[in-house]
Every structure is written in structure tokens, then in C-alpha cells.
Amino acid sequence: MKSLETHLRAQRAAGVKSLVPYFMAGLTPDWVQHVHAAVAGGASAVEIGLPFSDPMIDGVVIQEAGLRSLASGTTFDTTCSALGDQELAVPLVAMTYYNIFHHYGLRASARRLQDAGISGTIVPDLSVEEAEPWREACHDGDVSTVFLVAPSTPPERVIRIVAMSEGFVYASARMAVTGQAETVGDAPDVVARVRDACDLPVLAGIGIATPALAHEAAQSADGVIVGTALVRRILDGASPLDTERAVAEFRRALA
Amino acid sequence: MAEQREFMTAPDEFGRFGDFGGRFVPEALMPACLELEEAFQDAWADPDFLAEYEGVLSEFAGRPTPVTFLQRLSESLGLRIYAKREDLAHTGSHKINNVVGQTLLTARMGKSRVIAETGAGQHGVATATAAARMGLECTVFMGEVDTKRQELNVFRMELLGATVVPVTSGSRTLKDAVNEALREWVSCVDTTHYCLGSVMGPHPFPWMVREMQSIIGREAARQLRDLRVGVPDYVVACVGGGSNAAGIFAGFANTGARLIGVEAAGGAAISHGTPGVLHGMRSHIIQDEFGQIEEAHSISAGLDYPGIGPEHAYLSAIGRATYVSVGDEPIIGALRTLSELEGIIPALESAHAVAWLIREAGREIPHGSSVLLNLSGRGDKDVAQVLSILRGAS
Ligand SMILES: Cc1ncc(COP(=O)(O)O)c(C=O)c1O
């Protein structure tokens, strides 16, 4: 079993809900400090966004963060270099679009991720139909490939997706791009359908904008992914300390 | 032994043409792509659907479009040039063929709304037109930069009852309009069909749009037979995403004709791009050394796209079609030449194909060759831009 799954299973066994905040690599000069702050605030793992020019499943906030990050020169390599030096007590999961790895080379990407201490990837435009080359490139190392299940996914596809997903299954809470929502949407239903199909940890994300929503989503899910709500704060000038407090609030809501 | 292979057949079960194509979309959209594939296959095998599609194209869209022998241009270049007149189709370009098919399919799938992306506005206007006729709600995404460059087309779409949404994300041009349409589609996929405008995007779009445009090539092949020209030496079309080229190539893929796609130099995905993944497909893409997509720049907004349909990437890879590029400089001259010699003002996109003929007549193209030129659209939409360029130059 790859380390991401081991880690998340251990959390579940200990009765701890997983909290996975998302940060855009290179968004601010101190972006790595935000990652540390999130760990201090109680993150179970951290999702690292690698910016892409054409983020088709991201809403306006993460789009803006990505463009800003690109404008300041962020690349896959600069991100991996920045993270490679860090001692972080939790797993890191890279979230990006397939062209970044496709262009860098699949095997080279898998190696680079592993060398930087990144133990998983979420590549939302990589459908299970197209994923074999990437999974193969990651096969021998410790980089897990996480797949999403959407509210629109029919039961037979759920079975196929969870069979390929490693680390956890990402339960998409709604038919929408990343953003801030006012309800947990379809999260309970999607989580239930994933649970029927497998025993992997299931994390809910997309629109989980407040500690209250995180609490509600975690009634069914093993944890939550919180992106836009934190990135919005950083775009508005939040310091690492602000991030730590915000993450700690989510952590308290999940207790 | 003669070549036995058949070209421009259906892609494989994953929607791939060789190494290109496929389906690189978020899981939320996969069921819709699968549903669309099934609906298209079913409709395309249904004689009633095909009869309705061809009926609408003839009664509403003005098909068949004629083939015109371009006598004076032929004389001046030492070639025999026949033009397939998509400029005479309703709304002024070949784009209507595809949207008639897709809006009929939308109704057949029980959906009540279409969304579309547009660059210059040609596909947006065509979609708004077909949607009005079919009684479908229509929303068109258009880069904010393009809404300003093409104000009249925005108004045209609004007259046709469509809502035009200016896209302010990314570079605010065509590629961002595609992103925004895909984002919108995620949130309304139950009621809405994404009417994609070229042979690009995830499977089944590249194949479906080619099929819906292949009427151009079928008609032209018949018309050239009737004119006793038979198979021409060259079939030449401009390429943005590649739909008018795919449509006319389809009629000649399994003949000895040389197939030439003319890209704009500033958006030449085959000539200057590398394999990549964008907008749901693996194809040739113009990208930087880090895999970030670069903006295309062309005098013609319809060719301003950093990718190309995956089937073209494949036809290029196997050598069945050749892709060349033409810069901005000769385009206005080519437009004037065709206007003055033939009484046809071509769209700036189509003028790229004309410019290549002018450049290569007697060089790449031996004198005396027969050429089928796809005149994908008329230049009415471009006259204001041409005027301002000519004024600026004088
Ligand atoms: C007249 C005309 N020709 C060609 C194109 C390019 O599209 P495609 O390559 O799909 O034919 C456009 C696109 O707007 C167009 O309006």
C-alpha cells in the first residue's frame, strides 16, 4: 500500500476526520509558510496546486491565484524545489492538469514528485479511460493517483473509478467548478455511493467553504478538502498566521 | 501495390486517431460525453434523422453550395482552381452545417438549451441562428477582447435571441471562451448541450463535427465529377480548429488528391506546436517550455486558436495531409485579389488558403494543377477590420 492511503487509513482508524487544505504553489513569496501553517493548524495532508494556464474545472478564485502564480514565474520545477527542502509531517498531494505532467514527461514527473516528497496527485482532466500511462509511470514509486467521483457518475463507473483510485477517493460535492458554496450539495449521496463500492477513505470537496459545511460533510465523509475559502483569504492578503487560524477553525469543526 | 488503407474513418473506442484525440475531461463531464457519443451514433445511423438534417441544410441553410471555377485567378496563377462556396451558406460560413446537426441532436436528446464558444463570432452567430430555428435557449461565451473587436457579431447574436457572455478569465480570447463553456457545461449538463464549433475537444466532438461537415466534401466530389474535373490534384482549406478542412478532406481522403491545410502562422499548431493535452483532447498545441498554453495571434480571429483538431494531428503524422502556414502579411492582398478578379470577398480565414495558392503557384504547386479551394466563409464580417488596416497603412 502506498503511503498516502496508509496515512489516511490510520487517521480513520484513530477516529480522526481528515482535513486537506489546498494552496496554490507560488501564489505569494511566502507560500511555503502557508503550507507549514496549515500543518500547524491541524491539516492531515496538504494539496498543492501547480498552476496551469487553462484550468477548466476551477472557479474564478483559483483561476486568479493560478494566473498570479504563473506571472511570478512558478513552474513544476520551482514548486518541487521549494518543497523538496521542507520537513513536513503530513503527506502532500499535487493538484494540476494533465498537460503539465504530459509535457514534462510522465516518468520524469513521477520521479520529480517523489523526490520533492509529494505522495499523491489529483489530475481532474485525466479520465480513468486515459489514465493508464500515468498510473504506469507512478507504479514503482510512492506517488498515488487520486480520482474523483462526481454526482453525475453512474454506478458502474463508480466501481471502475474506485478500482483505479489510490490514497483516497475524491467525492465531488456538486456539479460545479471549485468555489465557495452554501450547502454540502450532493456530498452525502456521492460519499455513500463510493462507500458502497470500496473501503478506501473518501474525502469530500468542491465548495466546502466554511467550518460548518466541513462538519456537515464529514458526517458521511472521512474528511474534507478545503480550497477556495483559504485561497481567497491569501489573495486578500492573509498571513501564514491567519492561515493557521483559519485551518484550526476547520479542524475544531471536525473534532 | 496500391495503398489499401482507408483514411478518415471512425476513431477507436476511446475516440483516438492514432495517438491523438481521446477524452481528457473532468469526471463530471464524462457521462455527458458518453451520452453524446451514444446519441450521435444512434442519430447518425437513423435515416429519418439524416433526412431531417439534410432537409434543414437545403431548405434553411442554402445547400448544396455551388462549386465555382475561378477563371481569372486560375489564369493569373497558371492553375485550374475550383472554389467550394461555403461563403454562400446561411450565416456566411460552413459553421452552419455543424450547428444544424448539433441542434437537431440537442432536441433529440431532450435538452432545451445550447451553449457555445466563439472567437470572431461566426460559430456563435451560427449557433444562435440554429437555436432560434429549433426553439432552443442559447448562451454564447466570447472572450471580452473579442466582444470588443467584433461588436456587430455580438449584436447579431443578441438579435437572434442569444445571450452573449463576455469571458474575462485568462487571456480573454477564444481558448478562454472554450474553458468557460466547459465550466458552464459542468453545472447544467442535464439540460444543456455544448455545441462545440470545430473538430476539437473530447471524443465524440472531433469525429461528430467532422461527420457533420463532411457534406462539404461529399458535395464537392460529386460536383467536380459533374464538371468532369474528377479528383483534383490538390484540396486546400484553411485550418483553425480544422472543421472546414476536415469537412472537405473527408470527400477526398481516399483519392489521390493532395490534402493541404493552411494554418495562420501565429496559430500554427502543427507547424509550431508540440503534442499536448488541452480542452479534452491530445493533439498538437502551441505551448511554452513548461506546458503552459500560449496565445495564438492572427489577423483572423477564426484562426486564433493554439490547438488543432486531433484528426489533423494524426493525418499529419501519417503523412496523408500536409499542413503549411501563412503569416498575416499576404492576407489582405489575397483578399483583394480574389475580390477584384472573381467578385468574391473571402473571409480573412479563407483568404489564408488563397494566399497559399498565390504564394506556391508554380513552386510547390506545378503549373497546370487542378485545385479545389474551400472558401469557408465570406468577408462581410471582416470589411470593417480590412478598412481600418488599409487606412492605417496608407
Ligand atoms: C470563415 C471561417 N473559416 C474558417 C474558420 C476556422 O475554423 P475551422 O478550422 O474549424 O474551419 C472560421 C472560424 O471562425 C471561420 O469563420
Image (tube, rainbow, N blue to C red):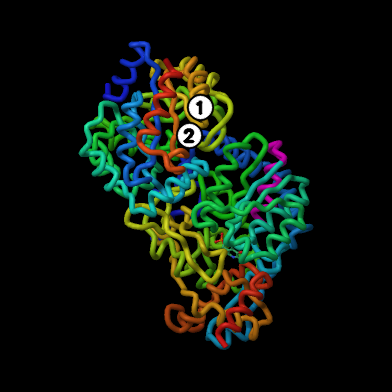
Please state the extent of the stretch shown in magenta in the rendering.
Answer: B97-112
Is disc 2's CB within 8 Å of ligand 1? no
Task: Say if A74 sits above or below A112 in the image.
Answer: below
As drawn, is B218 to the left or to the right of B282? right
Label annotation for residue A229: 2
As drawn, is B48 to the left or to the right of B74? right
Q: Earlier in the sequence, mark 1 or mark 2?
A: 1
Instruction: Please tell me whether the stretch drawn in magenta is mainly helix, strand or loop.
Output: helix
Q: Position of residue B371 (x, y in %)?
A: 54, 74
Residue B52 visible in the shown view: yes
As drawn, is B16 to the left or to the right of B299? left
* Amino acid type at mark 2: Ala
Task: Say if B196 sits above or below A9 in the image.
Answer: below
Query: Ligand 1 is found in which quarter of the picture?
Result: bottom right
Q: The C terminus of chain A appears in which quarter of the rendering? A: top left
Residue B76 placement: quadrant? bottom right
Q: Position of residue B13 (x, y in %)?
A: 48, 39
Q: Position of residue B98 (x, y in %)?
A: 64, 54
Q: What residue is drawn where x is 62% and y is 54%?
A: B166
Q: The N terminus of chain A appears in which quarter of the rendering? A: top left
Is disc 1's CB within 8 Å of ligand 1? no
* Amino acid type at mark 1: Thr
Label annotation for residue A210: 1
Nearest the viewer among B378 and A46 is A46
Q: What element does badge 2 sit on?
A: helix
